[in-house]
Amino acid sequence: KVPPGATLFVIARSGEGGPPLAVVRRAVGSWPAAVSMTDANAMLPGTSLAAAGPLRLVARISRQGGPVAASGDLYGEVGYDFASARPVTVTIDRIVP
């Protein structure tokens, strides 16, 4: 279901929601894909992801390549705490209505 030219976005948000705290953007390639996210990916310089508390990680495949979710995009999400520094798996198993 992933079209050629699609883009993978991995987004970290506060557990309560709100704007993205950090984003990693990658061209869609082979699966599974390993993505690392650090403070260098923060939307605002000086933001500490580890200090942000519990977060939601969202992995979304943008069919059109844009950063805003659109109908038909594929995504998955999982809770995460950057302070743990443990790897996590996000399964992309949903479709944006």
Image (spheres, helix red, strand yellow):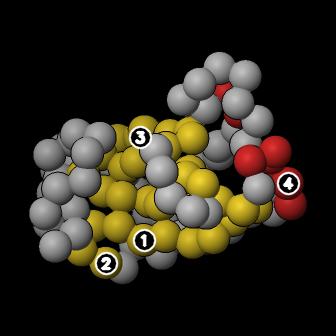
Residue 1 seen by the camera: no
Q: Which residue is mark 4?
A: 83
Helix, strand or loop status at disc 2: strand
- Which quadrant of the figure contains the N terminus? bottom left
- Work out whether mark 1 precedes mark 4 in sequence or the reverse, and give the earlier one: 1
- The residue wearing badge 3 is 26
Q: Relative to 29, is 43 above or below?
A: above
Q: Position of residue 85 (x, y in %)?
A: 83, 55
Secondary structure beneath dot 4 equals helix
Q: Position of residue 67 (x, y in %)?
A: 29, 41
Question: Does residue 86 appear to the left or right of 79 in the view shown?
Answer: right
Residue in the picture at 35% in, 67% down: 75
> Which residue appears at 65% of the width and 20% of the height?
45
Q: Which residue is mark 1?
A: 76
Q: Is residue 84 left or right of residue 27?
A: right
The residue carrying mark 2 is: 94
Report how far apart the C-alphas of labels 1 and 3 lie in the structure: 16 Å
Callout in the foreground (4, 3):
4
Q: Is residue 20 left or right of residue 79?
A: left
Report, in whole angstroms, how far the alpha carbon at label 1 lies from the one at label 4: 21 Å
Kind of residue indicated by mark 4: Ala
Q: State whether residue 79 is above or below residue 37.
A: below
**Residue at mark 4 to residue at mark 2: CA–CA distance:** 27 Å
Is disc 4 surrounded by few (<14), some (14 to 19) or many (20+) residues within 10 Å? Answer: few
Q: CA distance from mark 4 to mark 3?
A: 24 Å
Label 1 packing within 10 angstroms: few (<14), some (14-19), many (20+): some
Mark found first going from the N terminus, 4 or 2: 4
> Which of the two discs, 1 and 3, labels the residue nearer the N terminus?
3
